[in-house]
Amino acid sequence: MVTRARARPSAVARSRVTPFLFLLPAFAVYAAFALYPLGRAAQFSLFEWRGFGPSTFVGLDNYVDLAEDAAFRAAIGNALVLILFYAVIPLVVGLVLAAVLRRGQVRGMGVFRTVIFLPQVIALVVVAVAWRQIYSPVGPLNGLLDAVGLGALARGWLGDPGTALIAVGVIGTWIEMGLVMLLMLSGMSRIPQELFEAARLDGAGPVKEFFAIILPAVRGEITVALVLTIIAALKTFDLVYMTTSGGPGNSTTVPSYEVYFRAFDLREVGSASAVAIVLTVLIFAINVGVTRIGERES
Amino acid sequence: MERRHFLGTTAALGGLGLLAACAPGSDSGGDASAPAAEEVETDIASLGDVTLKVWDQEVRGAQNDAIEALIEAFQKEYPNVTVDRQSQSFDDLQQQTGLALSGNDVPDVLQVNNARGDMGAYVADSLLTDLTGYAEAYGWTDRFAASVLSKMMYSADGVTFGEGALYGLPQTGEICGIYYSQKKLDDLGLEAPTTWDEVFALVEAAQEEGEQPIVLGNLDQWPALHVFGPLQANFVPSEEIVTLGMGNAGADWTSQENLDALAKLAEWGTSGAMGDSPNGLAYDDAWPLYTKGTGVLLIGGSWLAPDMEAVMGEDLRFMAPPPGADGKVATTGGTGIPFSIPAAAENKDVAAAYIDFLTSDEAMQLIADNGGMPVNRTAELAPDKGVNKDVYEAFDAVSTEGTLLPYLDYATPSFADTAGAALQEVIGGQADAEAAAATLQEGYAEFTEGS
């Protein structure tokens, strides 16, 4: 048998350009459908344009106007409140639910999992229409309150500026809870059973177990869950569009709704693009923050 | 190093792309020169084979039936014309109209919403054909009432709404008025009101009897405009409302009359006369409630009549609001979405003939037969009984003897939002009449003084 020295890679394979050739197809798609539209949006944000006809270059005026725009500031404020309902509450509830489901080994676990995850699967428009009925002044929520003697609390939940945003937020919690729970469950399933046995031998109760073993083990999943749900909170549109159209007043308007409203109703494409760019930067910044914290602690 | 190089290339490519992309939009307006009456070719049969591209939004049952029947009749009359019709929902059509009109491949006939944000903007950009010459050639000014036609008129620069050149023609009409349940009125021992004072008294009487006087679902923000419009006419001279509603300069939302009107709405809203939470109830949930026996009155658009009649039968009645501030009937109303001809349309003469056909006397008959409300000949075509008889008579009275007030959200491109939010706050008690009037005036003044 003749041993041969391994052949040197061909000139093509050795070239420094080669790795990029492999990236090219994916990059081309990404550039065409993500980078180019983003670039165009950034460009539009520097113009005053109605979506047709001539446009005027206005520099950063659209951004300057946003700083004084009450509707825009309300939208950002509401989006931050929604993070509480879309991300923080589902995280807490989802963690606890997952821990309980993992421990319990209940029969029909699959059914529970499916039921809690179901809201994620239903089209958001359907969710919104259903909840609009629930919140209606003559809807089941007020009916329930009346039935248990709390009729004084009954109101048009989506029509009262004090409750509308919370009402929308609760829908968000209901939707995101299932996703967070599923992520946590999958994280917990990776924890070796021995760890729990050891902890139990050392006399740890369920609470101690939760904080000492589960929480550190699912830190990665928590970061992923937060990133996903915060993005969902900041770019929420369907729910607001279908339930309140941003009302009453500006009390439930969100940045994505402002983008739509400005571009298609007001025909201020420049201003709409500026809101979209600010929203993109905001989502990016918050999520860089979340990931940094997640990575540092682990 | 390599990574940086790659990123550098990416950035450079992206930057190049940005530079290469031209500024959004273009200056190319269409050919807006309007033909004079004598240049209009009305002999369509002599034009050879023509395919007429039509985009409309008449997708609902009865409207669709009427249009299809009309197209068939039109093609029978002119065998050389083939109508290529695309229909889609109002929202879809509205959102792509701007793009479509500024492109090269435009339809010959297109339904364009006559609000400032739509038709007004297109007129300013010379994207629609001035129909004045056609109107003369076909005698449209005799066919339509002046207060109806004015809803499709703009000055050539798009600044003045309500006068100037004609840019479209509607097929159907609509008005906001007062629905009442005859049985509820009988139970309360009351007659249908003939003055606004009687309306106010009726509201109070119903409330004392434990009935909800008025049903309103205002979660969607705009329904309150259809209540406030008729109500405003009781306090404010109709000429001023027209000026405000069309967004022309010279009126004032903070006048005492407007304050009185807003105060009355606030009173109704906060006293529970419109239910516990009108702002929390959706429009499309409110009228079914009414048909099931909640409330005595419902103030709203004539388009609700067929659906509500299906449940309530002869119990449901409709009336134009009582005479307003100038002693004449005035109420919010208007027309269906008008048919226009894009400036770049290829077959303008055939397009005009098509629009003429759609608005002819026979077409009005056909629309009435299909359950719609034709914009012309309303009185003669009125059915013998049922709520549509009331609706036809009310529309006829308002469009011929009274004043058809524009929808208040025509005023400025953003007024639907401004007024919707302001009225919601008035009804919910979050803002008083003065504060709401100031908000409305700000939106109105910013627009009229800015243009």
Image (spheres, rainbow, N blue to C red):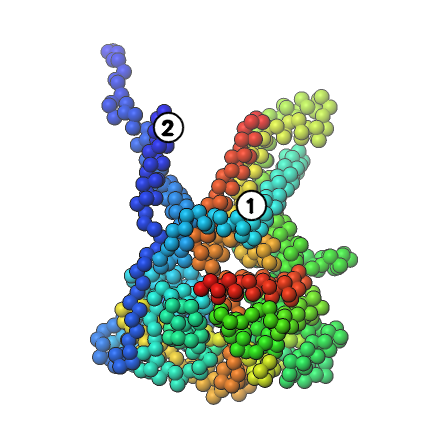
Above or below for A150 versus B131: above
Above or below for A216 versus A54: above
The answer to whether the residues at label 2 and label 1 have Cβ atoms under 8 Å apart is no
Residues at discs 2 and 1 both on one chain: no
Q: Which mark is residue A58?
A: none
Of helix, strand and loop, which one carries label 1? helix
**Front-most of residues A176 and A41:** A41
Mark 1 — residue? A233
Measuring 29% from the left and 28% from the top, which residue is drawn there?
Answer: A17
Measuring 49% from the left and 82% from the top, which residue is drawn there?
Answer: B399
Q: Which mark is residue B3?
A: 2
Whether residue A18 sits left or right of residue A91 in the image: it is left
Chain ID of residue with mark 1: A
- In this view, the mark in front (2 or 1): 2
In the picture as drawn, the residue positioned furthest to the right comes out as: A149
Q: Is residue A175 visible?
A: no
Of helix, strand and loop, which one carries label 2? helix
Amino acid marked by disc 1: Ala
Above or below for B163 versus A156: below
Give the crowd class for mark 2: few <14, some 14-19, many >=20 residues within 10 Å. few
**Front-most of residues A283 and B187:** A283
Amino acid marked by disc 2: Arg
